[in-house]
């Protein structure tokens, strides 16, 4: 678990070790449609544009309780076996950078999921309207979601 500031907003992160090679874990995460299996909020992903056969832009459909919303995402880092990250916006407003870093270990791969807050005032207001959460709650909700996502990813990949 880490917490740091990188200029845009706070970055929070969670880490887990998965007993699988880094290239396999990266491939699973980079197939963004699979996120709906692992995330407690994401219920579907629609890939809207591909670049070289890989997702370049996609829409994430999210739900928490009675709230349902979507975000648009653009892949900004796609380094196989090392890092996968995407910028998130809603209605043209910056929301966050989500990413995954992969490091090979003796036991498989250390996977770090991170979130960096990039919301401006308009995005904070939209977040409150569509998610029912105050802006200050989002880091706590996201950290809990990361733990659940990483545990589900680990279970799926280690079950093979």
Image: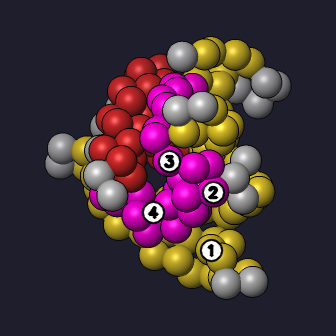
How many other residues sit within 10 Å of disc 2, few (<14), some (14-19) or many (≥20)? some
Dot 4 surroundings within 10 Å: few (below 14), some, or many (20 or more)?
Answer: many
Which badge, 4 or 3, is on the more N-terminal residue? 3
Question: Considering depth in this image, is 54 or 22 the residue closer to the camera?
Answer: 22
The residue range painted magenta reads: 13-39
Report the disc number at residue 20. 3
The answer to whether residue 32 is above or below residue 156 is below
Distance (Cα) linking label 2 and label 4? 24 Å
Give the residue pinned by disc 1.
Answer: 55
Which sits in the foreground, 85 or 136?
Answer: 85
Q: Residue furthest right?
A: 7
Quarter residue 100 falls in: top right
Q: Residue at x 65, y 25 (%)?
A: 11
**Mark linked to residue 138:** none
What residue does disc 4 label?
60
Q: Is 119 located above or below residue 83 in the figure?
A: above
Q: Position of residue 107 (x, y in %)?
A: 52, 32
Can you name the residue that lies furthest to the left here?
Answer: 66
In the image, which is nearer the foreground, mark 2 or mark 4?
2
Separation of marks 1 and 3 at Cα, in angstroms: 23 Å
């Amino acid at each position: 678990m880490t917490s740091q500031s990188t200029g845009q907003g706070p970055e929070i992160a969670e880490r887990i070790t998965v007993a699988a090679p880094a290239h396999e874990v990266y491939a699973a995460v980079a197939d963004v449609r699979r996120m709906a299996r692992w995330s407690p909020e994401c219920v579907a992903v629609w890939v809207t544009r591909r670049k070289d056969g890989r997702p370049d832009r996609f829409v994430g459909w999210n739900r928490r309780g009675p709230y349902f919303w979507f975000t648009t995402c653009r892949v900004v880092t796609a380094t196989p076996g090392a890092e996968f990250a995407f910028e998130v916006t809603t209605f043209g407003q910056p929301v966050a950078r989500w990413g995954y870093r992969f490091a090979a270990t003796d036991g498989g791969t250390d996977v770090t999921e991170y979130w960096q807050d990039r919301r401006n005032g308009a995005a904070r207001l939209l977040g409150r309207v569509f998610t029912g959460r105050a802006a200050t709650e989002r880091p706590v909700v996201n950290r809990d979601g990361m733990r659940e996502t990483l545990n589900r990813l680990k279970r799926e990949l280690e079950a093979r």
